[in-house]
């Protein structure tokens, strides 16, 4: 931790403050607000794109928007959306990809928006956290590294987090798309 | 419905949405083929790196189809 970032705005902005300092101070405060507005705008564009698709396909679904961390989160919730999730979330991933492109087309910035449909990602997250915790138990018991199934980068991140929470270490091995997590006792 | 859905999906990701045209072609025994035409400048956008975007479009339209697989062809239109 450096102390630079912890300086409060009051200590920076004095009467003698030079323009560059003032600019730097303004920059520290402003982007955060702008960034949230930017992410909310991403969510709005995504929601329009997806809502029109639901209309055309005559599917019932409500769209929720949120900003989490540094990402726009958009979720389609509804009873009969299984076809939009697909096996292993394949259709969901494709639709997320297209939605990101639609957002990028309008904003000019690359989007890292996350799309969820019918709670698929939320359920998968719970499942992966449990899997990570179970792998930790096994690694501790057996005293040997435990290799898991290949996963996407996002899925591996969830497992790594679960392992870290259990105070063990983990690594990713292998090449995409067969990269997998190894839990180290 | 599939034509409209595909047209909407493509229009959203290109720079020239007014130039997007999707039409149906019926093969004798191959089921339905959808032909996508876009502005020549947008061809790269609908194909994507290593065909990623084209694959995503095929995956979503395939999931919406009620009568089995759908073929999607991206038709190259010459510059005007």
Image (cartoon, coloured by chain):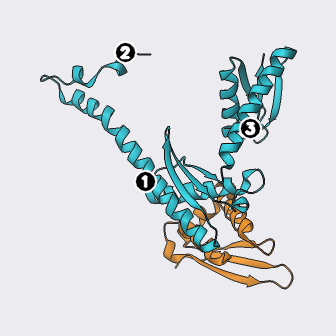
- In the picture, residue A146 is in which quadrant? top right
User: In the image as oriented, which residue stretches furthest toward the front?
Assistant: A79
Picture quarter with the N terminus of chain B: bottom right
Write down the residue under mark 3: A127
Element type at marker 1?
Answer: helix
State how many labels appear.
3
Write down the residue under mark 1: A41
**Badge 2: chain ID:** A
Element type at marker 2?
Answer: loop
Q: Is residue B40 above or below residue A86?
A: below
Q: Nearer the viewer, mark 2 or mark 3?
A: 3
User: In the image as oriented, which residue stretches furthest toward the left?
Assistant: A15
**Badge 1: chain ID:** A
Q: Are marks 1 and 2 on the same chain?
A: yes
Q: Residue at x 67, y 46 (%)?
A: A121
Q: Are marks 1 and 3 on the same chain?
A: yes
Q: Residue at x 27, y 29 (%)?
A: A25
Q: Is residue A118 above or below residue A137?
A: below
Q: Residue at x 50, y 37 (%)?
A: A69
Is residue A185 among what the camera can see? yes
**Badge 3: chain ID:** A
Q: Separation of disc 1 and disc 2 at Cα? A: 33 Å
Element type at marker 3?
Answer: helix
Write down the residue under mark 2: A3
- Badge 1 crowding class, 10 Å Cα cut-off, few under 14, some 14 to 19, many 20 or more, is some
């Amino acid at each position: 931790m450096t102390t630079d970032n912890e300086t409060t705005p009051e200590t920076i902005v004095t009467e003698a403050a030079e323009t560059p300092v003032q600019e730097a101070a303004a920059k520290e405060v402003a982007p955060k607000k702008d960034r949230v507005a930017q992410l909310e705008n991403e969510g709005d564009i995504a929601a329009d794109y997806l809502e029109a698709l639901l209309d055309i396909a005559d599917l019932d679904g409500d769209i929720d928007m949120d900003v989490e961390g540094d990402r726009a989160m958009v979720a389609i919730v509804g009873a009969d959306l299984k076809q939009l999730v697909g096996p292993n979330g394949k259709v969901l991933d494709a639709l997320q990809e297209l939605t990101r492109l639609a957002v990028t087309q309008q904003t000019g910035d690359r989007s890292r928006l996350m799309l969820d449909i019918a709670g698929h990602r939320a359920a998968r997250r719970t499942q992966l956290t449990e899997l990570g915790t179970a792998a930790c138990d096994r690694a501790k018991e057996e005293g040997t590294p435990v290799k898991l199934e290949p996963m996407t980068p996002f899925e591996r991140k969830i497992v790594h987090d679960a392992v870290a929470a259990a105070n063990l270490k983990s690594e990713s091995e292998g090449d995409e798309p067969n990269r997998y997590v190894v839990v180290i006792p | 419905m599939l034509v409209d859905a595909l047209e909407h999906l493509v229009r959203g990701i290109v720079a020239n949405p007014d130039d997007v045209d999707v039409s149906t072609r019926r093969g004798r025994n191959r089921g339905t083929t959808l032909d996508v035409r876009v502005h020549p400048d947008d061809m790269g956008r609908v194909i994507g790196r290593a065909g990623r975007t084209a694959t995503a479009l095929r995956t979503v339209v395939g999931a919406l189809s009620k009568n089995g697989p759908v073929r999607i062809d991206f038709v190259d239109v010459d510059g005007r």
